[in-house]
Image: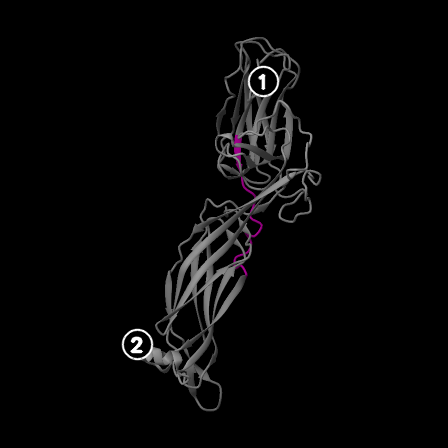
């Protein structure tokens, strides 16, 4: 997968650490996949390391910022309060340095390694949050969430799940100057992780039904063409008790599971609830999908970062450590972010005639059926991360649809937002 080198901001001659990941057919790792590669060391000076460590890791990070202003005009000041969570998901470290020996200049030393990606976390974080029993998240060990990022890098109100492999030369006696932001004796290769789809075996998902009742009062229920009905007739139809009347129910049935990058089917239905004796013919029904949306919800939390300064960036304070100082500000904050993705419906509309059916009895008679339906499909974009629930970050999805039904020249509309719908990873 390529070469990864450390930052070169160090002072003086230092060993060079390079990390190579073996080429993979798939660029996204899944549980129990093998990650292998090798570390290459070279040094301009003789050095005897304590260890050469390689670590496979996963972590969850959130950052929320709140502010408080006081004063007016040129005397106004703003204090910022920072909330951060750094939660390890797992951490597996090996020392690949076989025996203590001196590494000399002019040679390259290679150390192979291999990891198996775990299925889940190995930590319990029940002591880390103000509300450990909040069912939105979980504090118990759980299946690993996917690589994920929400927000803007280096800006507050963001959350991310990241994975990687880090190689590190452990040599405490080497002087690297002032404390650098990046350890010059290490380098990291980020990796992409995606959990298996727990619902991949389900070919036909269940559907959740939503419905709404309407009433149509019109001469079109006697077989008249809507185009032949003028203004006066429409006015008469609206206020006359003699006008044929139809009470009906429109429904939408949405799937209860989704898959990233895959199509999903949903159904619109029409059903007669009650009709007056003067109804002799029910016009055709034109179902139209007026709007189809995939709603995503990112919910994340973080405890107060008491060691942060009250500045915009919230860098570590020189005056405070991590000891809580006051109960004036909440010790934990949560954020709920909602976004929508507009989807195309295929087809956008369908014209359906109510079929003629036999009437039960000795005499052979036919009448219009009291129900009809139309099927539509949408597609979840392939870049959509699967839903998950972790220590401080949860991602969930809902389908929202606006459907219209044109009957007898009149449009009836209904909006439905489904319940939380599990979204699995791409089938492979």
Decide if residue 227 is on the left or right side of residue 157: left
Which of 85/195 is in front?
A: 85
In terms of image quadrants, where is residue 165?
A: top right
In the rendered view, would you say 63 is above or below 388? above
Which of 143/223 is in front?
A: 223
Q: Position of residue 333 (x, y in %)?
A: 61, 41
Q: Position of residue 158 (x, y in %)?
A: 53, 38
Q: Which residue sits furthest bottom?
A: 362
Magenta stretch: includes residue 197: yes
Q: Position of residue 295 (x, y in %)?
A: 49, 51
In the rendered view, would you say 426 is above or below 284? above
Q: Main secondary structure of the magenta part?
A: loop
Magenta range is 190-206
Residue at mark 1: 179
Q: CA distance from mark 1 to mark 2?
A: 83 Å
- Residue 225 visible in image: no
């Amino acid at each position: 997968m390529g070469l990864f080198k450390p930052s070169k901001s160090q002072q003086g001659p230092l060993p060079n650490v390079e990390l190579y990941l073996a080429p993979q057919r798939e660029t996204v790792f899944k549980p129990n996949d093998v990650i292998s590669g090798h570390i290459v060391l070279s040094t301009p000076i003789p050095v005897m390391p304590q260890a050469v460590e390689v670590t496979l890791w996963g972590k969850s990070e959130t950052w929320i910022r709140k502010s408080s202003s006081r004063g007016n005009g040129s005397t106004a000041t703003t204090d910022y309060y920072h909330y951060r969570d750094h939660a390890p998901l797992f951490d597996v470290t090996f020392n690949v340095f076989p025996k203590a020996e001196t590494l000399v200049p002019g040679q390259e030393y290679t150390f192979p390694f291999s990891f198996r990606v775990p299925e889940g976390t190995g930590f319990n974080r029940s002591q880390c949050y103000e509300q450990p029993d909040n069912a939105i998240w979980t504090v118990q060990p759980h299946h690993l969430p996917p690589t994920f990022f929400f927000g803007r890098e280096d800006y507050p109100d963001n959350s991310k799940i990241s994975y990687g492999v880090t190689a590190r030369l452990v040599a405490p006696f080497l002087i690297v100057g002032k404390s650098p932001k990046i350890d010059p004796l290490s380098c990291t290769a980020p990796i992409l992780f995606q959990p298996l789809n727990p619902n991949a075996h389900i070919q036909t998902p269940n559907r959740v039904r939503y419905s709404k009742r309407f009433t149509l009062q019109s001469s079109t229920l006697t077989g008249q063409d809507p185009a032949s009905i003028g203004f006066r007739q429409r006015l008469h139809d609206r206020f006359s008790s003699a006008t044929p009347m139809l009470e009906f129910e429109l429904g939408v049935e949405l799937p209860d599971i989704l898959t990233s990058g895959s199509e999903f089917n949903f159904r619109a239905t029409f059903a007669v609830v009650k009709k007056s004796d003067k109804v002799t013919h029910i016009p055709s029904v034109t179902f139209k999908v007026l709007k189809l949306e995939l709603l995503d919800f990112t919910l994340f939390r973080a405890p107060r970062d008491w060691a942060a300064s009250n500045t915009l960036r919230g860098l570590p304070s020189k005056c405070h450590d991590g000891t809580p100082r006051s109960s004036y500000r909440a010790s934990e904050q949560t954020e709920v972010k909602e976004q929508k993705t507009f989807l195309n419906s295929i087809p956008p509309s369908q014209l359906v005639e109510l079929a003629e059916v036999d009437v039960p009895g000795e005499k052979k008679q036919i009448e219009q059926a009291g129900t009809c339906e139309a099927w539509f499909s949408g597609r979840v974009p392939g870049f959509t991360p699967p839903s998950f629930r972790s220590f401080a970050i949860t991602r969930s999805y809902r389908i929202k649809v606006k459907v219209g039904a044109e009957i007898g020249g009149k449009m009836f509309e209904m909006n439905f937002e489904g319940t939380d719908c599990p979204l699995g990873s791409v089938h492979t």
